[in-house]
Amino acid sequence: MITTRKNFIILMIAIAALSYGCKKSQRIIHIADQNVLATPIVTEDFTHDMTNWTVEQLPGGTVAVKDGKMNIDDFSGCTVWFNEKLQAPLMIEYDAVVVSAGGSNDRVSDLNCFWLAKDIHSPNDFFKNSKSREGKFQNYHDMQLYYVGLGGHDNTKTRFRRYAGGGDRPCLPEHDLSDKQYLITPNALNQIRIVVYNNRVQYYRNDQLIYDFHDEAPYTNGYFGIRTYKNHMTIDNFRVYSLTKK
């Protein structure tokens, strides 16, 4: 009886500590004149391995955990998907550094990502066609997703696209940016934040709001992927938050 009571007390303390930790990590963010509560639901610090990720990569490149970070050293095309399907409203955050240190793939370009992606050819099994996609960019054009190519075209362009499925992926003039403030600084920290809340789709880099897109028919669930081409970069501090009105 004493042992049972002791175990019960320990369990209650653990639950209370977990609840306190979760509440402590909650944040209030401001979206379109609303205060929104962000509650963490995914934390990935790359302290062990790539268990939570699926790599689609053409030959010649590598993706691995190195020094507590995801290290992408890509030769000809790569997408690294987080394995869990995500549900909006949400916020995604991660830290990225594009490496320029003399390596064979140290090309300062293409700090890209997909989010809320769906494979229209396999709606019930996103990873069924993983091997055939291979990391080749054209093989993602038929998907439904949101995409930002930060510093694409040899670090001359940053673009936002909404892929509608079936190859329709327009880039509006206001989403085609070439000013230096929207490009990549080599070896510098990029703190990326993506928000999907109701009809709002936002993309931030280092607290700078780059895209604020009103979507009449927003995507509400799907997969997140880091995307690049002939690039060497690191990813760390990956977080996903659920969003609720405060």
Image: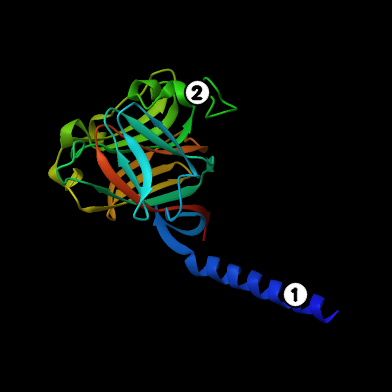
Query: Residue 145's mark?
Result: none
Residue 91 in percent (x, y) is at 44, 50
Work out whether 216 lies above or below 68.
above
Residue 86 in percent (x, y) is at 52, 42
Examine the image and state in which quarter residue 140 appears: top left
Local crowd size for mark 1, using a 10 Å CA cut-off: few (<14), some (14–19), many (≥20): few
Q: Which residue is mark 1?
A: 7
Residue closest to the eye, 245 or 153: 153
Disc 2 marks a residue whose amino acid type is Asn
Q: Residue at x 86, y 79 (%)?
A: 1
Residue 172 in percent (x, y) is at 28, 29
Residue closest to the eye, 4 or 118: 4
Element under disc 2: loop
Q: Nearer the viewer, mark 2 or mark 1?
A: 1
What residue occupies the far bottom of the structure in this picture? 2
Residue closest to the eye, 174 or 22: 22
What residue occupies the far top of the structure in this picture? 166
Q: CA distance from mark 2 to mark 1?
A: 47 Å
Element under disc 1: helix
Residue closest to the eye, 124 or 199: 124
Compared across the picture, whether 237 is left or right of 84 comes to left
Q: Which residue is mark 2?
A: 129
Disc 1 marks a residue whose amino acid type is Asn
Residue 76 in percent (x, y) is at 28, 27
Q: Earlier in the sequence, mark 2 or mark 1?
A: 1
Q: Residue at x 42, y 49 (%)?
A: 92
Work out whether 105 lies above or below 16.
above
Identify the colour scheme used: rainbow
